[in-house]
Image (cartoon, rainbow, N blue to C red):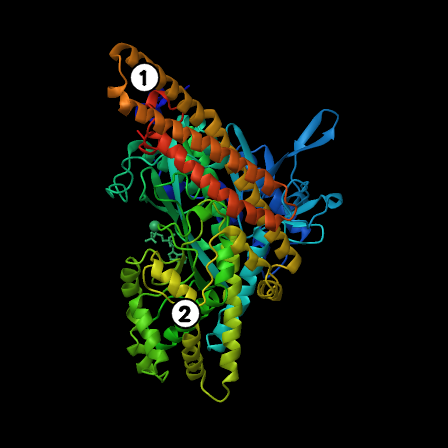
Amino acid sequence: MRNNKRSSIASERDYKVEKEKSVPVSEYFGENTFNLKVMRKKLPKDTYRKVLEAINEQGVLDIETANIVAHAMKEWAISKGATHFAHWFQPMTGATAEKHDAFIEVIGPGEVIERFSGRQLVQGEPDASSFPSGGIRTTFEARGYTAWDIASPAFIRHNGISTTLCIPTVFISYNGEALDKKTPLLRSCKALSKSAVDMLKLLGVEGVNRVYSTLGPEQEYFLIDASFYHQREDLVLCGRAVQGAPPAKGQELEDQYFGSIKERISSYMHDVEEELFKLGIPAKTRHNEVAPSQFEIAPLFEEANLAVDHNQLVMDTMKLVAKKHRLACLLHEKPFAGVNGSGKHLNWSLADNRGNNLLNPGTTPQDNIQFLVFLIATVRAVYRHADLLRASVAGYSNDFRLGANEAPPAIISVFLGEQLTKILEDIEKGRVTKATDNAIIDLGISTLPILSRDNTDRNRTSPFAFTGNKFEFRAVGSSQSISFPTTVLNTIVAESLDELAAKIKAMKGKNVNQAVFDVIREEIKEIKPILFNGDNYSKEWEKEAARRGLPNAKTTPEALEALVSEKAMNLFSRYGVLTPVELKSRYLIHLERYIKDMEIDVKCLHNLIMGHVVPAAVNYLQKLADALIKSKEILGTGKELSNLEQLMKKVNSGLNKCLELDRAMMEDLSKAESIEDEKEKAFALCRKVKEKMSDLRAYADELETYIPDELWTLPKFWEMLFIS
Ligand code: ADP
Ligand code: MG
């Protein structure tokens, strides 16, 4: 039993972290990365040039050059205290992985030197047999290969007293199949670049040789005292509380959002940011979120590949630093039922190699034509592949959030805001027919950035919103890697751009701008069903969306089906992003993950029910029974005791319900577990077991409100959420 539980909460004073230095950020930003600045200093001119070319995909690094880079990298890392190097990669677990090797090489009996070769830098061969591969990598070919991603800087990781040089890599099988999240992302970046450059050429834009997607992920998270965290098996194992009554006061007073940040939290954020700055991650914004103990951190946007790596590092760093502050950082999408969940708004746009944002409405007619093309191409892509976008954010934990009336629904639609919608309507209805200078300027597009930004703030319910000069994909879960959603977005937009280009080219004899304009008009008619500016939480929208034929996959097993459709197979293989085999394997990995996550949740709930809830209820019943018997003895009659009896009955019936539903849940679980077929198993868990879980939880949560605090052995929501 939990004794004196509140004394286990340390006071704020215990955590006052001494500030190590007061150096301006600009002076140490990126100091733990082997970035261009360091390379320029440490590498011979010629080598540096070759590295730059390789980064910009204009050349491949030869082994001599790799040797020189590796040597410089090793010297630099050792000067930072590193003893080991590791290829750092992103297997399909969703987390990152690293295998450490010491820099040592034996040169004689009992004698070593530090050495790091180009070969070791460029390629690694970790045993891959324990990573999910969805059947791609058979056990006899257990090797996986890691290959250096030169575009993402190597970095130093301190962990306790150990220091390691981490080298971002892709992770592939012997046959070159992707076993990770980075490989398809890089392929999608390439595909998008090609399609976008072709489109720009068609529009008459000169001098652009590369287009890349930019990402700014807004990361939400919860912080609770570590002592509470360690008292709850569910938080430790599932990342969420599978049982717990909501606090009497949650977020209804709206006093948390953007509120002043508590000292303990502020110190934590400071420490996190300092680490991130050293890693060259531009952490820009921090604030309190809607729920108590919920916060957000948002870096400035970066090129997709880098932003994805950085988001993984942000999540890692937040967890590590939390330990130092005796906090626990919860990244789960719905750690506490009844209060706001956590997402990761993924801001996405396109930029050319000169840094121009292609979704920025411009000031000249030419800019505006270009803006319209990329805007329509994106909306069109979302319309055609809404199912894939939904699948890209599917996962057991995100199901608790999507469609739960606080996060975007599982229906993907696009919000453009009033002004832009009006402009598209004018084009569609033929009120604007000519792509002449004035007509396009008259559309008012040049004033859009300001207008639509104001506008979008009023609609926080849309899963895919245009916010002035970028799209914001809001259905991504807080714990998810942003790699796959980005891969999907990049690929579907590449396809959309190519298809629009083909249509434009088919309008022979017209001047390009007019051809573009006419194609856009046709497209607007087509893609209209995906546009929705209203309240995405409303019941009416669900009906309306069904009428419009928009997919509404409410759960992960339903959503994942989109990955193995003909349409998806064709799309991803046409763009060289994922082969049908790779796609199928990803489908299986996600399905298996869903099953495992759910099994862990169910078992955890069972353990809490039998280990805490039932014993607490039995204890209380015993006390009530004693009280009743003694009272009857003293008072002689039972009449005045009817309320006490009522209470006893209430607790008893709650206890009964818990026992009954727990048994039913465990029976359904073992039935589901005996199903061979993974898809059927996932559906059985999703349809049957999940319902039992939530019924059981409802009874347990209600019991909690009747059982005395001293008998209740689990930390309660109010204690955990209102951090001292
Ligand atoms: P809000 O909460 O109002 O949506 P934030 O400032 O919290 O805004 O986050 C906005 C995010 O969008 C930041 O990470 C920002 O860098 C990013 N962003 C801004 N412009 C772009 C762009 N062109 N491409 C991608 N992300 C962008
Ligand atoms: Mg924000």
CA–CA distance in space, label 1 to label 2:
65 Å
Residue furthest top as drawn? 634
Label 1: how many Cα within 10 Å (few below 14, some 14–19, many 20+): some
Label 2 C-beta lies within 8 Å of the nearest ligand 1 atom: no
**Towards the viewer: 35 or 355:** 355
Q: Residue at x 60, y 41 (%)?
A: 671
**Towards the viewer: 135 or 515:** 135
Q: Residue at x 31, y 44 (%)?
A: 290
Read off the residue under disc 2. 529
Read off the residue under disc 1. 628
Three-letter amino acid code at the position of disc 2: Pro
Q: Position of residue 510 (x, y in %)?
A: 46, 87
Is label 1 or label 2 in front?
1
> Image quadrant of residue 707?
top left
Marked residue nearer the N-terminal end (1 or 2):
2
Label 2: how many Cα within 10 Å (few below 14, some 14–19, many 20+): some
**Residue 48 visible in the snapshot:** yes
Three-letter amino acid code at the position of disc 1: Leu
Q: Is residue 398 left or right of residue 440?
A: right
